[in-house]
Image (cartoon, helix red, strand yellow):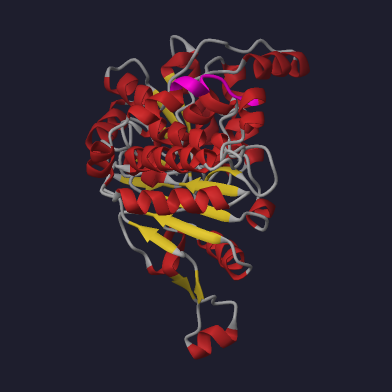
Amino acid sequence: MRYNRDTDRYEPVSWDAAFQLIARHLNALDNPDQAEFYTSGRASNEAAFLYQLFVRSYGTNNFPDCSNMCHEASGVALRETIGVGKGTVTMDDFAQADAIFVFGQNPGTNHPRMLDTLRQASKRGATIVSFNNLRERGLERFTNPQKPMEMLTNGYTEISKHYYTPKLGGDMALVRGIVKALLELDAERQSMGKNSLLDHHFLTQHAEGVDAYLELVRESDWAVLEDQSGISREDMFKVAGIYARSERVICSWAMGLTQHKHSVAILQEIVNLLLLRGNIGKPGAGACPVRGHSNVQGDRTVGIDEKAPKPLIDKLEAVFKTPMPRERGHNAIQAVQAMLDGESKVFIGMGGNFAAAMSDTDATRQALRNCNLTVNVSTKLNRCHLTPGQDS
């Protein structure tokens, strides 16, 4: 469908007419970097791969992506700490974990598939500890709609053995406090001639900067940690005790942790907690950023990345015999700014609702209106369609 500015209506057009209109606008640009190519979690991995191949063949790495708005912090934090910006666990690991720490997410509302996984873990005896400002019933107890007897008898499975509600943004202080408590428990244990709670063999082989980090933790003031986290020292010791008694621990999180200015630091603190007892790289343990759509992680794997990884570009050029751009392109925020400044003149969205998904919706809608062409590949009407460029 094509937008008719005179009637303020979208009107049916042929596929050929739509393709010709898009091609005319793309070919009229001074350079390919004047176009923005958005991808959302609505695109399949296969479609996303073809999309990035088309865009790079066209000549740009301008890939604003839904990942920029949700789990960008996870990718950055994990790449800087363990070298890969993705989770280190599979669903099978949840069946082997002794403890699961759930941070900043409400599976009952946003990840219902995960609730049954947590239910199964709880039933076999895993200790689930939840940290969220909001107490959600699904994380406290869960009635499985696939179990008729539970539905008929108001039965349920207890999910969280412990539930803590830290201050908004207080998660870094919370995790730092858990680590500090762990170190104090370890010192007490060693004073009695018992083995250390820390996995020193793992740390020696796989970690660096350990001593400096531990000194930083020891210097952290309990009063400050309690004030910033909103969690008492006593409760942080309880969590540290659970962590110390568990051989295999998973830490999972969602956007309750990634939507803060200091979110990268929060997530790196969680990784440090996992590393101290070797809970990375073994069955039943690891880091688990919980994305929404399956391909929010998959998009990056198949090439939707404005930072153009060199091995990917080298392989694409070798296989398709086509030169590919290597310069860094625009992320979602940079794309909006470029459209506001008149530098980018075409916006193409593969699914999603860019106008509503960005945090500054007014600025985003004005940016879209500035475009000579906006294109949305979608299956239902949303706010992005209602903010057309000159052509849409």
**Which residue does the image show at 55% across and 35% down from the upper left?**
276
**Which residue does the image show at 59% across and 27% down from the upper left?**
52
* Identity of the residue furthest to the bottom in this view: 153
- Coordinates of residue 30 in the picture (x, y in percent): 43, 9
Asked if 96 appears above or below 261 in the picture, the reply is below
Residue 16 appears anywhere in the view: no
Could you say which quadrant of the image residue 82 lies in?
top right
Asked if 239 appears above or below 360 in the picture, the reply is below
Q: Nearer the viewer, residue 8 or 90?
A: 90
Based on the picture, tell me whether residue 372 belongs to the magenta stretch: no
Residue 33 appears anywhere in the view: yes
Asked if 299 appears above or below 235 in the picture, the reply is above
Q: Nearer the viewer, residue 122 or 50?
A: 122
* Identity of the residue furthest to the right in this view: 319
- Coordinates of residue 74 in the picture (x, y in percent): 48, 35
Q: Nearer the viewer, residue 287 or 127?
A: 127
Q: Which residues are the magenta region? A: 206-212
> Which quarter of the rendering shows the N terminus?
top left
**Which residue does the image show at 56% across and 34% down from the upper left?**
275
Could you say which quadrant of the image residue 164 lies in?
bottom left
**Which residue does the image show at 69% across and 41% down from the upper left?**
282
- Coordinates of residue 145 in the picture (x, y in percent): 54, 77
Q: Is residue 25 left or right of residue 310?
A: left
Q: Is residue 226 left or right of residue 119?
A: left
The number of discs equals 0
> Which quarter of the rendering shows the C terminus?
top left
